[in-house]
Image: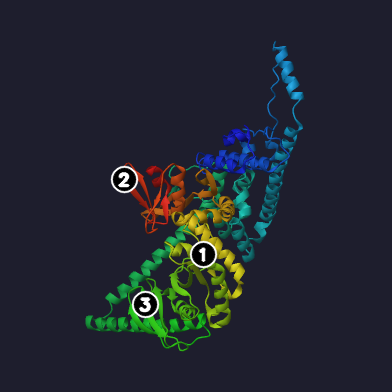
């Protein structure tokens, strides 16, 4: 089958049209439902891009054909390319003139076709060589694993390797799956750590979670070899949980049946009183140690507990360097009254203290950033003028260089003032899709031009993906080229999506890539078993462009908080959430 037939288009050199065709086909062919068809589609997509990038080919040159064989589609070998089928009639055909004409047509075949096939063949040969190198590395390491698996550095290497892109590119190669299925027990019969890493890498599920999911023979053999270690891990976790529950029951039972009622009551009261006193003392000591380590240049007053619940305690203290600053520290406790998380607002207030002197607007956000703890508070600086980002960045760098005390902060967030989703701006997106870089910085380690480039890119990316209805046509024209480059990179990360050209009065303003991503969550829990959900999502700004592409006419709200779309005489509002379920948008259309 030809590459153009697989993509469903005629031969073209327009990469944008090729990518649109590929994106459209991925909606019909999903790698989990039809892995072999998807690999064949991806190979045709890469070959078509190679054709588009080579200026030596003629516009009417034909493309090499892809084989229908299962093994060729799976491996992507250079030999998967074959010559077009001959158009010469079979012997015995009495139409001699037609046979002669066909032969003449073959004799006049242009050299460009041969060069094109050679070029495509070379592409697949390069892919095959790269794959073979990665497989050779795996086999070399696998041969030695039996004598080395007990070493901690070997365990760590395999765990990191099985999470790497190099392994993901070869892990479904049939010969490799067969090798692992046949050799797993012999090579790692006494090791659970690495075998569990293989289990997680291949994404196997428990029997109770599989439902109607089946595996191929070699993959089933590998799963069977790994399942015992998964079962042991599962039983160990259940046993630890049960032991913990039993200990809690035993502790309660000892309190209930201790001695005479009066004596037991007295002991109980004293124990409870002592426990709370101990927790309070431990909490204060923990806060003092925590703040001392985090801000070694500052001194603080003794913490005072101002609030306490079963799982939370709040302490207040003041900075001896800045008496006007009152610090709040929050500790979170688990069921065993062990501290498992903490947060404080001193960094935010310290930034506000100096920021006001330099004319900055400051604030704070809860963490959950890629490089920042989920429950921590992060100090944030806000800018308001897109045209003065260079001045803002230069002033920020200057403040942190002049005020060395600020360099105690772990990070500082940067956010545009007045955006609808400030936490999304700083995080660079939402869970499952971050189209721009996370906006947290260490300004004392940067120069202003470096920060300016990163902030400008984030500003443009955020506005296109989350508030395009608040972009003016002048800004579309100004930002379009830079955003187009961002979309090229975005398409590589989120291949399930499509392109849309924004036009006005017959003029192409800019090209926009609309990524479709998957949100993995848990729909429900029944008898301790999680039932996973995989929801296809689209960002609210991309929803705006998607509706336009489908012929709808979105209208921005007067206050810029979202946009309206009419359907059946009724008006629907989008903008309350930063993302939408794709099925809801398609149902709306």
> Relative to 196, is 213 above or below?
above
Q: Of the residues tagged 1 and 2, which is closer to the observer?
A: 1
Q: What crowding class fits label 1: few (fewer than 14 Cα within 10 Å), some (14-19), or many (20 or more)?
A: few
Query: Residue at (56%, 45%) from the top-left corner?
Result: 219
Residue found at the very far top of the displayed protein: 94
Q: Position of residue 398 (x, y in %)?
A: 57, 77
Q: Earlier in the sequence, mark 1 or mark 3?
A: 3
> Relative to 436, is 401 above or below?
below
| Residue ID for mark 2 | 570
Residue 313 is marked as 3
Residue 159 placement, left or right of 206: right
Let me know if residue 485 appears in the view.
yes
Q: Secondary structure at mark 1?
A: helix
Q: Secondary structure at mark 3?
A: strand
Residue found at the very far front of the displayed protein: 505
Question: How far, Cα to Cα, is label 3 from label 2?
Answer: 49 Å
| Residue ID for mark 1 | 386
Q: Of the residues tagged 1 and 3, which is closer to the observer?
A: 1
Considering the image in quadrants, where does the C terminus appear? top left
Q: What crowding class fits label 2: few (fewer than 14 Cα within 10 Å), some (14-19), or many (20 or more)?
A: few
Considering the image in quadrants, where does the N terminus appear? top right
Q: Earlier in the sequence, mark 3 or mark 2?
A: 3
């Amino acid at each position: 089958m030809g590459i153009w037939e697989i993509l469903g288009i005629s031969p073209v050199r327009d990469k944008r049209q090729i990518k649109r065709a590929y994106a459209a086909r991925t909606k019909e062919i999903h790698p989990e439902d039809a892995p072999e068809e998807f690999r064949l589609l991806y190979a045709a997509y890469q070959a078509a891009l190679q054709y588009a990038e080579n200026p030596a080919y003629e516009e009417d040159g034909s493309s090499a054909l892809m084989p229908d064989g299962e093994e060729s589609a799976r491996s992507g070998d250079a030999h998967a390319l074959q010559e077009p089928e001959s158009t010469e009639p079979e012997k015995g055909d009495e139409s001699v003139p037609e046979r002669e004409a066909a032969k003449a047509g073959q004799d006049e075949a242009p050299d460009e076709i041969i060069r094109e096939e050679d070029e495509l063949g070379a592409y697949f040969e390069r892919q095959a060589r790269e794959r073979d190198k990665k497989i050779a590395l795996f086999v070399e390491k696998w041969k030695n694993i039996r004598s080395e698996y007990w070493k901690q550095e070997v365990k760590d290497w395999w765990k990191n390797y099985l999470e790497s892109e190099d392994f993901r590119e070869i892990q479904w190669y049939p010969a490799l799956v067969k090798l692992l299925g046949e050799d797993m027990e012999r090579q790692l019969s006494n090791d659970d750590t690495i075998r569990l890493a293989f289990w997680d890498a291949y994404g196997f599920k428990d029997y109770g979670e599989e439902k109607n999911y089946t595996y191929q023979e070699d993959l089933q053999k590998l799963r069977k070899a790994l399942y015992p270690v998964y079962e042991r891990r599962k039983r160990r976790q259940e046993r630890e949980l049960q032991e913990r529950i039993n200990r809690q029951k035993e502790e309660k039972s000892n309190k209930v049946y201790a001695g005479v009622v009066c004596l037991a009551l007295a002991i109980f009261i004293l124990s409870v009183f002592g426990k709370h006193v101990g927790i309070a003392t431990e909490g204060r000591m923990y806060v003092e140690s925590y703040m001392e380590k985090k801000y070694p240049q500052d001194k603080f007053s003794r913490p005072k507990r101002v609030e306490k619940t079963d799982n939370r305690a709040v302490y207040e203290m003041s900075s001896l360097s800045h008496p006007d600053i009152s610090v709040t520290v929050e500790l979170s406790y688990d069921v065993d009254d062990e501290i498992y998380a903490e947060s404080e607002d001193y960094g935010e207030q310290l930034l506000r203290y100096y920021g006001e002197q330099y004319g900055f607007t400051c604030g704070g956000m809860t963490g959950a950033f890629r490089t920042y703890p989920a429950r921590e508070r992060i100090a944030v600086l806000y800018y308001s003028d897109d045209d003065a980002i260079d001045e803002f960045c230069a002033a920020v760098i200057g403040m942190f260089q002049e005020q060395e005390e600020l360099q105690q902060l772990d990070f500082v967030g940067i956010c545009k003032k007045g955006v609808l989703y400030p936490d999304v701006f700083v995080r660079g997106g939402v869970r499952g899709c971050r189209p721009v870089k996370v906006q947290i910085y260490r300004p004392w380690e940067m120069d202003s031009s470096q920060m300016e480039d990163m902030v400008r890119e984030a500003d443009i990316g955020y506005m296109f993906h989350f508030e395009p209805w608040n972009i003016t046509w002048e800004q579309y024209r100004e930002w379009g080229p830079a955003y187009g480059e961002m979309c090229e990179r975005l398409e590589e990360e989120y291949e399930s999506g499509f392109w849309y050209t924004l036009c006005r009065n017959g003029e192409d303003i800019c090209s926009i890539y609309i990524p479709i991503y998957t949100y993995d969550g848990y729909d429900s829990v029944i008898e301790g078993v999680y039932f996973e959900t995989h929801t296809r999502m689209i960002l609210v700004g991309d929803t705006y462009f998607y509706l336009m592409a489908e012929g709808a006419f979105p209208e921005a709200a007067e206050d810029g908080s979202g946009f309206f779309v009419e359907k059946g005489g009724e008006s629907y509002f989008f903008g309350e959430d930063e993302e939408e379920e794709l099925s809801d948008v398609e149902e709306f259309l």
